């Protein structure tokens, strides 16, 4: 039998690449001769439902919703401008950005959004880079809005202004 679940029914969690989900059920399933505890997640933005074995949840990057300190740190990361210029080829850069998004880490998703937003100020983005920028932005907006109990439009405005307004 698996370790005890760290999430309960009604909790909100974040699952890598998919975003914010509600834990709608925690139950035990028998598959073959193995008994597994599983979480049933329902994603807020898409309604997608998935089942995640409890013992794999953390390994897969499932984590609690960002707290106040996480939100503050995310905006600090987004505000950093003293990052080294990127000299990688577009496909290597794309792979590195995808790896960061797949971790599910709010800070790594923020780094992707920041880095592509800054890149956008110096060059035309490829289709893949634009898609990744939009995906990182969506993940940030959804989680930050819920974590701060703020409308998504306010979070969108704040994120967009960080990369369009002149530095203070």
Image (spheres, rainbow, N blue to C red):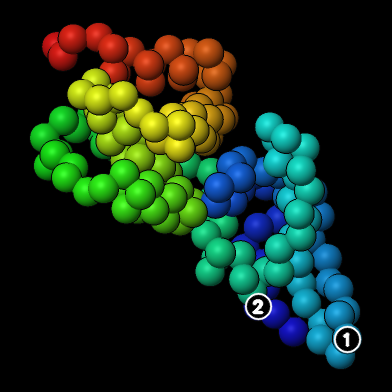
The image shows residue 135, relative to residue 150, as above or below, that is below
Residue at 59% across / 42% down in the picture? 19
Q: Is residue 44 left or right of residue 19?
A: right
In the image, residue 29 above or below residue 57: below
Q: Residue at x 40, y 42 (%)?
A: 109
Which x, y percent locates residue 68?
Answer: 41, 36
Q: Is residue 25 above or below residue 111?
A: below
Q: Nearer the viewer, mark 2 or mark 1?
A: 1
Dividing the picture into quadrants, the one containing residue 56 is bottom right
| Residue 29 location, quadrant | bottom right
Horizontal side, residue 21 vs residue 156: left or right: right
* Circle number at residue 3: 2
Residue 96 disc label: none
Ranked by sequence position, the earlier of labels 2 and 1 is 2
Q: Nearer the viewer, residue 162 or 86?
A: 86
Q: Is residue 100 visible?
A: no
Left or right of residue 123: residue 48: right
In 3D space, how far apart are the residues under numbered discs 2 and 1 (Cα atoms)?
A: 19 Å
């Amino acid at each position: 039998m698996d370790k005890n679940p760290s999430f309960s029914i009604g909790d909100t969690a974040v699952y890598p690449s998919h975003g914010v989900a509600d834990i709608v059920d925690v139950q035990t399933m028998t598959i073959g001769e193995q008994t597994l505890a599983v979480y049933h997640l329902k994603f807020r933005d898409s309604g997608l439902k998935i089942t995640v074995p409890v013992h794999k949840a953390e390994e897969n990057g499932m984590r609690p919703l960002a707290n106040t300190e996480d939100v503050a740190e995310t905006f600090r990361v987004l505000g950093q401008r003293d990052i080294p210029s990127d000299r990688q080829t577009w496909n290597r850069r794309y792979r590195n950005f995808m790896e960061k998004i797949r971790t599910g880490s709010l800070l790594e998703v923020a780094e992707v959004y920041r880095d592509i937003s800054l890149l956008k100020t110096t060059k035309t983005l490829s289709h893949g880079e634009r898609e990744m920028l939009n995906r990182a932005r969506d993940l940030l907006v959804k989680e930050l809005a819920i974590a701060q109990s703020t409308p998504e439009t306010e979070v969108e405005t704040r994120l967009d202004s960080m990369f369009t307004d002149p530095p203070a």
